[in-house]
Image (cartoon, helix red, strand yellow):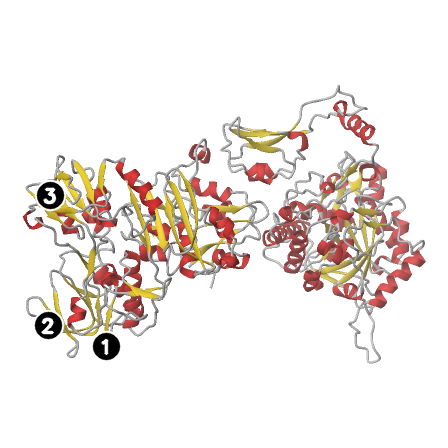
Amino acid sequence: MKYDYLIIGNSIAAVGCIEGIRENDTEGSICVVTDENYRVYGRPLISYYLWNKTTEKKMLSYRPDNFYKKNDVELMLGTRAEKINPEKKTVSLSGGREIGYGKLLIAAGSSPFVPPMKGLDGVEKKFSFMTLDDAKVLAEAIGKDSRVLIVGAGLIGLKCAEGISDRAGSLTVVDLANRILPSILDEKGSAIVQKHIERRGVKFYLNDSVAEFKDGTATLSSGKKIEYDAVVIAVGVRPNTALAADAGGEVNRGIATDLKCVTTIPDVYAAGDCAECLNSITGKSQVLALLPNAYMMGHAAGVNMSGGEELYDDAIPMNAIGFWGLHIITAGDYEGEAYVKREGTKYKKLVTANNNLRGFILIDDIERAGIYTRLVREKTPLDEIDFEAIKERPQEMAFSRAVRKDDLGGVK
Amino acid sequence: MKRIYVNEEWCLGCHLCEYQCAFANSGMDDMVKALKGKTIHPRIQVEGDNKISFAVNCRHCSDARCVKGCISGALSRDKDGVVVIDTDKCVGCFTCILSCPYGVIMPSSDHSVVQKCQLCMDNASGEPACVKGCPNRAIVYEERI
Amino acid sequence: MLRDYLYPEYEAVRNSELCIGCRACERQCSNEVHRYDSDLGKMVSDSTNCVDCQRCVCLCPTHALKIVKSDHTFKLNANWTQEAITDVIRQAGTGAVLLSAMGNPKEYPVYWDKMLINASQVTNPSIDPLREPMETKTYLGKKSEEIQRDRNGNIIPETSPQIELETPIMFSAMSYGSISYNAHKSLATAAEELGILYNTGEGGLHEDFYQYGPNTIVQVASGRFGVHEDYLNAGAAIEIKMGQGAKPGIGGHLPGEKIVDDISKTRMIPEGTDAISPAPHHDIYSIEDLRQLVFSLKEASDYKKPVIVKIAAVHNVAAIASGIARSGADIIAIDGYRGGTGAAPKRIRDNVGIPIELALASVDQRLRDEGIRDEVSVVVGGSIRSSADVVKAIALGADAVYIATSALIALGCHLCRSCQAGKCNWGIATQVPELVKRLNPADGKERLVNLVHAWTHEIKEMMGGMGINSIEALRGNRLMLRGIGLTSKELEILGIKHAGE
């Protein structure tokens, strides 16, 4: 069996790839291989699923029911890609099958990283928080009285905390870092968000770590002891790079790709959380494990795989996330001169460098944030806009009349 | 596809489009009933003063970043090209607000989901209410190439 | 002074039940009648400066506003009317000439409304304009008395220069300065689409509008603003303005603060200087002098453009028209005392001049009597309010009509008669950029085109009813008119019989 297009992984990058391919090629055969047993769903939804803001049915309707059929895609659920054989242009699947490809996309995503922790093996109820199945078993395992210990105060750990907050008795979060969400917030921002989350009854132990799990009690490095009924490990994720590495592809932290999303192996592309792409702000390659980026990179890969050309050259780190109604939007990085405005929980930090907006943090003040994102992404020279006005609030008025005319009267 | 375009040369900054929008999407049959004494949450917003002003709403980009970035699939382009939001699927993560370069997707009045202009395809207005209610044809609904 | 306080003549009344506080009225009123009171948490109005332009009424999305005539009154007096008393108080306070705008609003007789149109019954069938051809095309200019032939007996088709109109209606003179750029653009583009002409007025022709030349009458007035060779050759005809119905006998004065940017450039006078149109043309004191100007203009335009001489309808208008016809002019335009203006002394507007109906009838009759009716075409203006007025004017002897007030109403004017203030809320009689942009010429053009199309349809209906299928056959056909409630003198001047006769 040989497919014109073979996609390993069935998450957002895969969907982007399918839609990218079908813009150019409505005929070529497409096969998607996934070790999960679900249609595509947005992984970040799992916390909303636990929080009852969505349902499994709604989650699984990321794309319409007829998505695979309409796009003429063969979906192999519960099937693991074991090995890529680039010389034969085949992929070995679990169960011993081997299928050929014309072009291959690795969109294998990432896996939870579980660091070695003393006594963790003996913890009966321990969970990761990555997939729908993770969420389901976690939900099964905890009840109204459960004391849940979350290791990791990053995006995943805290979204998990919010998700299970109505299902669990108490929530405790431990992190080695001295503040929460360090990957997206500065110190002030972390403090604001931490305070907000603490008001919801979540306890934080920062600058600390679990020294040992034993008999339902976690002893921290500081000596504090926390009793738990369940443990969620949300320390971080690792890109799934083994398939590419084993096939001889270049792998750094993620699978190395060029602007057309091609790996160093001919006819093999990579996209999404397993792959590195160009961070257009720093000019360096890195893994930008974010859902919108996964789609866009997958889409670019799909277009390029099917004979078109789409450079994936404007990726930036960015995040939209909320905790108990407190919304945070960030983009870019914070290397430069900062303009800061704070009022209660409202916090705005705009960072400029070299006549560009390089990054920003918005907390509880997110309206029209995309205009800031646009400045970051497009590297708009700030002396060409009314930066003073846009500092106050994002607005079209800050752009020149000509830009506005195109924005509001041009075909998009 | 037909889109709403705004020509600031003719915008008077009267803000009537905002009220027409809020009314059209209120589900009520009477503007007074719908809007009196209420703070409006229109999907179109007027910027500026009486010298320079213009209304801004969804551009219905053919290559829409909001759709690409939506984590739940709540945002999509329908068969006519209209970028639509399925509020049933939306979880209110606001990734679209992060993504939209024009700042035209906004939280709903209770912030639980987002709202955006859907060209009045989703209400009883029949045609975009802002266009119908613009006293100076600054907002038009037409096909441009 | 407190003692000069005059209660507002019109009051903006808000139905608080309906008001949703959108503040559109506040944003749209250049007279600052409406405002949002944050202490009271609602919209309030101060009608002191309300001119009853109806802008707020039209834009209020819940129709919560109306303007009412104040019932405040002085002690009733049929002689000393409220207006008479008010004017005295104003002048006692200011020592100034009272200014006003648009046409004479006084209760003089409207002769159009005292004439009725005929229709065919039995003996001469009426014509259905939807099924049979109905010609509204009109040519203005000198008509040859007899057919000219060359040596071989072939007809020489050349005639004096003519204006060709698809329908016998033109937009009369309104200068750029008295009305806005967008108003001019609306008129120019509408004229082009309609196959008729608009008139620059005395302010010159903005360079953007040269492209509409074939549909433009360029005017030469006593101030000669913006007149140069290219201007004279830009249009389809040249009009010498001797007078204006709204203010016969006096000149015009556009204050320096309105002479800005393009207006200064178009008028060819320095920014900030007053644009004063003298009462007379200083080079015209006789028909002979007028003839010199007519031929100067013909010379300058290579005899290719018909020359119109426009006068206000005044006493002895027939004799004056006879003189003009003999001056070499191709067209006489007569403007009645109800004609509009952007600014005129109130006493002049309300007391000088005569009704266009009587002027037209007497001019047409006089030119016929003298055998020179074909030497000129006659165009009349000064409150043509409907297609019925057009039909009556043509039956009285006009070749075509000029409309301006009707055109402005189509553009949004509600006849608040405050043009002189320069704060027109409809973007017409103003040069304030924020107000000018309220008139989108795309909309303005469409509304003008609609209006003239509608009138043309109605003209055809009325002509068909009379059994007449061309403007040509209606012109001067006074048998088609009957007077009602008129004295025998009035009937005599109008040259029509009384209804029932």
Q: Residue furthest top?
A: C75
Question: In front here: A121 or B63?
Answer: A121
SS of the residue at dot 3? helix
**What is the CA distance from the residue labelled 1 to the residue labelled 3?**
45 Å
Asked if residue C62 shows in the view, the reply is yes
Q: Residues within 10 Å of mark 2 (few under 14, many from 20)?
A: some
Residue beneath the point at 70% across and 57% down: C470
Disc 1: which residue: A266
The reply to whether residue C204 is visible in this rendering is no
Please provide percent x and percent y for residue C426. 64, 44
Q: What is the number of the mark on residue A140?
A: 3
The quadrant in which the N terminus of chain C is found is top right
Three-letter amino acid code at the position of disc 1: Pro
Q: Nearer the viewer, residue C334 or A190?
A: A190
Q: Is residue C181 above or below residue C79?
A: below
- The residue mark sitting in front, 2 or 1, is 1
The answer to which quarter of the image holds residue A193 is top left
Q: Is residue C31 left or right of residue C40?
A: right
Q: Chain of mark 2?
A: A
Residue at numbered disc 2: A98
| Foreground: disc 3 or disc 2 | 3
Residue at the front extreme of this rendering: A222
Disc 2 and disc 1: Cα gap in Å?
Answer: 19 Å
| Three-letter code for the amino acid on which mark 2 is drawn | Glu
Q: Where is residue B16? Give x, y as percent.
A: 51, 42
In the rendered view, would you say C287 is above or below A311? above
Percent x, y of residue C151 = 84, 80
Instruction: Read off the chain for label 3.
Output: A
CA neighbours of label 1 inside 10 A, class few (<14), some (14 to 19), many (20+): few
Marked residue chain, label 1: A
- Report the side of A213 relative to C349 (left or right): left
Q: At x 49% / y 59%, what residue is drawn?
A: A406
